[in-house]
Amino acid sequence: MLLADMGANVIKIEEPTRGDDTRSWLPPAAKLKPNPAAPHLPPESAYFLSTNRNKRSLALNLKHKSGQSIIKKLVKDADVFVENYLPGKLSEFGLGYEDIKSINPSIIYASITGYGQTGPFANAPGYDVLIEAEAGLMHITGEKQGNPVKVGVAITDITTGLYAHGAILAALFNKLRTGEGAHLDISLFESQIASLANIASNYLISGKEAERQGTSHPSIVPYQTFTASDGYIMIGAGNDKQFVSLAEVLGKDEWNSDERYKTNASRVNYRDELVGQLNCILSKQSIDYWLKKFKGSRFSFGPINNIQRTFEHPQSLARNVVTEIEHPRIGNVKLTAPAIGYSGEKLKITKPPPYLGQHTNEVLREEGYTDDELLQFRKEGVVIDNSATPRDSKL
């Protein structure tokens, strides 16, 4: 999706009868408009809509020889081929890296799997929540005395996508310089381990097992949520100067000469005492009181917003984090906007997330297939086209 945001012509190959798995991950689903395109299709899931903007959908049966031939024709002029099958599976269809490389020697072939192309778990399927559990993230997430919990979004999937995005761009840059392609081996498992960041380093350096910390930080104090009289507030004093500012605004100047609190290292050692005092002070006033009190201070602070308040946040409104685009089945649909801007211009959503098979005929015609061939493909179950153009309705 990020490559599509940047202007790449992304063709999403989907199984023709049900499409991408996330199409069935509902509720919620967007309400269809009156007389929608492809009314026979199921509703558009919010999950699918969140991750497929700026793409086109080609509904194609990879198990059919003609489907494999179509893919091989598509890759002749492609820069990048992305797949997330188990290692070796696409080779069974003549679409493995060596097969595609023989057609397009400079292809960048990105394989995204649960555990990577090699190793004892290479052929095991991997889902976000499983990898969160198996690669350490769930162990460190949750309250100190509570059970392990998953992160609120599919963070391992997101992180892996970001790693893949960066790897593909680097490979494209190398291709521009050398003309050479590459086979990229990207896994959820290794992406998640790499994302353990300082927690991984803490263990590798000290040998000490990590513990769940709730919202607090293992190496910084104070850096967590605190209880106000009407909810929660987040405070982060990332260095000693910021802690001095916090102590002053709370009227606790004596903390700045207290040996227990003068340095971050000592505050970590006396975490429970300091956090207890902070909770005692902060619980006496409301969130709004503290937000006004802290305004202009050197430390970071903020409320724990729900999703509604997140989108109503003044910064969200100022930065246009929500965009709207017309969808042929839904009508006007709201989506989160691309997060990146270039020289003051934010990337734009130019295509709504596609419905299943919306662009099948469009893509195949671009590759030179005739209407007679398209009709034959449909009769043989090679493709499904759900476009609503007058020309396609006659096929």
Image (tube, rainbow, N blue to C red):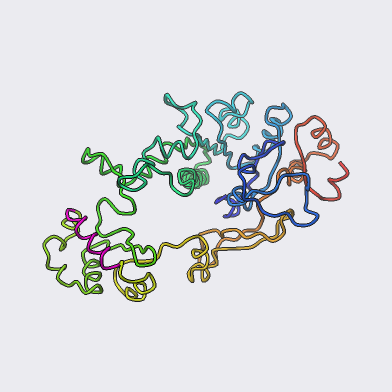
Identify the residue at image location x=71%, y=44%.
Answer: 356
Q: Quadrant of residue 253?
A: bottom left
Residue 237 position (above or below residue 40): below
Residue 303 position (above or below residue 71): below
Image quarter in which the C terminus is found: top right
Name the spot of residue 291 as percent of width and height, x first: 36, 72
Residue 278 lies in the magenta stretch: yes
Task: Count the numbered circles shown.
Answer: 0
Q: Quadrant of residue 14?
A: top right
Give the main secondary structure of the magenta stretch.
Answer: helix
Q: 253 and 54: which one is in front?
A: 253
Residue 281 lies in the magenta stretch: yes
Report whether 274 appears left or right of 351: left
Name the spot of residue 189 as percent of width and height, x first: 42, 36
Q: Quadrant of residue 386?
A: top right
Q: Which residues are magenta?
A: 269-282
Residue 329 position (above or below residue 282): above
Identify the residue at image location x=78%, y=48%.
Answer: 39
Identify the residue at image location x=26%, y=68%.
Answer: 281
Report whether 244 appears left or right of 140: left
Name the spot of residue 376 as percent of width and height, x first: 83, 33
Q: 81 and 380: which one is in front?
A: 380
Name the spot of residue 54 as percent of width and height, x first: 63, 53
Considering every residue shown, the one lying at the far right of the view is: 394
Report whether 295 appears left or right of 220: right
